Amino acid sequence: MSDDAPKDEENVVVEGEASEESIEPEGEPEEAPVEEEEVDEVAEPLPDDQSPDLKEERVEDSAEDTPADQAVELEQPGQDPVPPQSEPVISERTTAAEAEVARLSAEVARLRQSMAGAAEVIEDLETPPMPPAVLKDIVIGAHIVSDFARLARQLDREQLIRATMGTIAMLHPDQPSVMIATRNMTMLPRLDERGLCAAPLGGEAPPFAPEDWRLLEVVLASASLATGGPAAVIHSHGAYTTAASCEKDLVVVAPIDEIGKRNIGKVVIVDPDDDSPEDFLRQVMEALQQGGMRCVVVRGRGAYAVGRDLDQAWANAAMVEHSMRIVLLARQANLKI
């Protein structure tokens, strides 16, 4: 009996294991083998995060939004094409530009009128009405005083005269035997009737007469013979003319510019001689004639430019200074002329 009991127990264990193997869970059915689908070799592999259904939806959406389809929907038969939106914008810009040009043109015209009015005001301020200068037995008209004042201011702007340096003189238009000149050490840029003096030619110099009164008389007399009556002279102290005349042993300066050659010709330089004034005045007359009755330069003391009236004397003084400047600049640059 003892031997049969273990055998029975072994049989019971074997039967229990077999029964456990034969029992399967009811909720987990047995998986059927999946057959592999045939994949077309031409198809490209899809990304891992995209499925074929999503890709097809995106392709359909992009196809619906293409410009070609929109154009086909817009261009339907029996309807006019929609004009481009750029034409109204261009027309608006053109209109705005034309309006701006018209506004600027009106502004320019207004500014020109203002400038013209300002020029007249400035001219009136610079040449205020001058009273006549009443001297001993000589009356200088108001228009003559205004011409002196106007020219003095202009010469100061061009740096032909500076402050009290320089002299303006002319023969009296109504009395050719009388010389009118600016006073000695008068402030030329602020010249008025009080800065003038006058006296007959060949007579005694008037009070406050310029130091070169006799020289001015000789120059005006020579110019009057050349012009047949009226004459004017400007004693200028231009920097370039004075500097060029200081060169030792330089007697004649020939302009190298065309304007100077045509209008001045040549400029003769005379040495001052305080010990022999009569000889000095004679040399000045000869130098003025050699220079074409336009200008004579006294070494280190400036130029005496002459003319029929004040304006012509001013023009000759300006041209001499311009030509002397060109000569000095050419020498400084070592130009071969």
Image (cartoon, grey):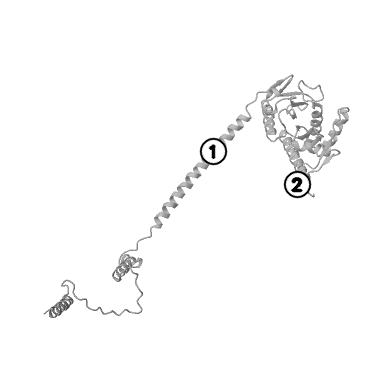
When asked about the image quadrant of residue 50, the answer is bottom left
Q: Amino acid at mark 1?
A: Gln
Question: Farthest residue toward the left?
Answer: 1
**Residues under labels 1 and 2: Cα distance?**
38 Å
Where is residue 117 drawn, in percent x and y? 56, 35
Question: Farthest residue toward the top?
Answer: 136
**Residue that numbered label 1 is attached to:** 113
Packing grade of label 1 (10 A; few <14, some 14-19, many >=20) is few
Q: How many marks?
A: 2
When asked about the image quadrant of residue 215, the answer is top right
Residue 258 tag number: 2
Say if mark 1 contacts mark 2, CB within 8 Å.
Answer: no
Nearest the camera: 33 or 263?
33
Nearest the camera: 310 or 252?
252
Nearest the camera: 221 or 37?
37
Q: Is residue 259 left or right of residue 12?
A: right
Where is residue 264 drawn, in percent x and y? 78, 41
Using the image, determine if residue 77 lies above or below residue 325: below
Where is residue 163 drawn, in percent x and y? 71, 29
**Disc 1 element:** helix
